[in-house]
Image (cartoon, helix red, strand yellow):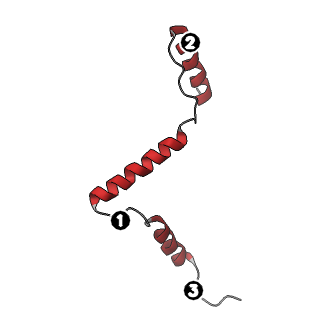
């Protein structure tokens, strides 16, 4: 069953029972992403790690290792 089919079934059941409709799929995705980011920041503070600036330096190190070291034509 797809997400859309499940949503339609839940909406139908809610209407039959006089309950409020469930939120549409994808409606709160960005809110969930923000909450996950805040939770990870909180866990970093509790663990004593820096909260910001971890992803970009790690990506730069990874890209630097993959780049060939030699003269470019």
- Disc marking residue 50: 1
53 displayed left or right of 10:
left
Is 34 in front, or is 70?
34
Q: Which residue is mark 2?
A: 15
Q: Residue 17 location, x and y as percent?
A: 50, 9
55 displayed left or right of 68:
left
Quadrant of the frame with the C terminus: bottom right
- Residue at image position (32%, 64%) is 49
User: In front of the other: label 2 or label 3?
Assistant: 2
- Secondary structure, mark 1, is loop
Q: Which residue is mark 3?
A: 69
Q: How dense is the environment of label 1, judged by Cα within 10 Å: few (below 14), some, or many (20 and up)? A: few
- Secondary structure, mark 2, is helix
Is 33 in front, or is 63?
33
- Residue at image position (58%, 24%) is 7
**Residue found farthest to the right:** 73
In the rendered view, tell whether residue 42 sits above or below residue 68: above
The earlier-in-sequence mark between 2 and 3 is 2
In the rendered view, tell whether residue 21 sits above or below residue 36: above
Q: How dense is the environment of label 3, judged by Cα within 10 Å: few (below 14), some, or many (20 and up)? A: few
Q: In 3D space, how far apart are the residues under numbered discs 1 and 2 (Cα atoms)? A: 48 Å
- Disc marking residue 21: none
């Amino acid at each position: 069953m797809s997400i859309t089919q499940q949503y339609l079934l839940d909406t139908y059941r809610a209407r039959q029972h006089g309950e409020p409709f469930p939120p549409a799929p994808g409606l709160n995705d960005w809110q969930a992403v923000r909450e996950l980011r805040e939770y990870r920041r909180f866990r970093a503070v509790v663990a004593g790690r820096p909260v910001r600036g971890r992803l970009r330096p790690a990506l730069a190190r990874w890209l630097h290792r993959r780049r060939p070291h030699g003269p470019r034509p």
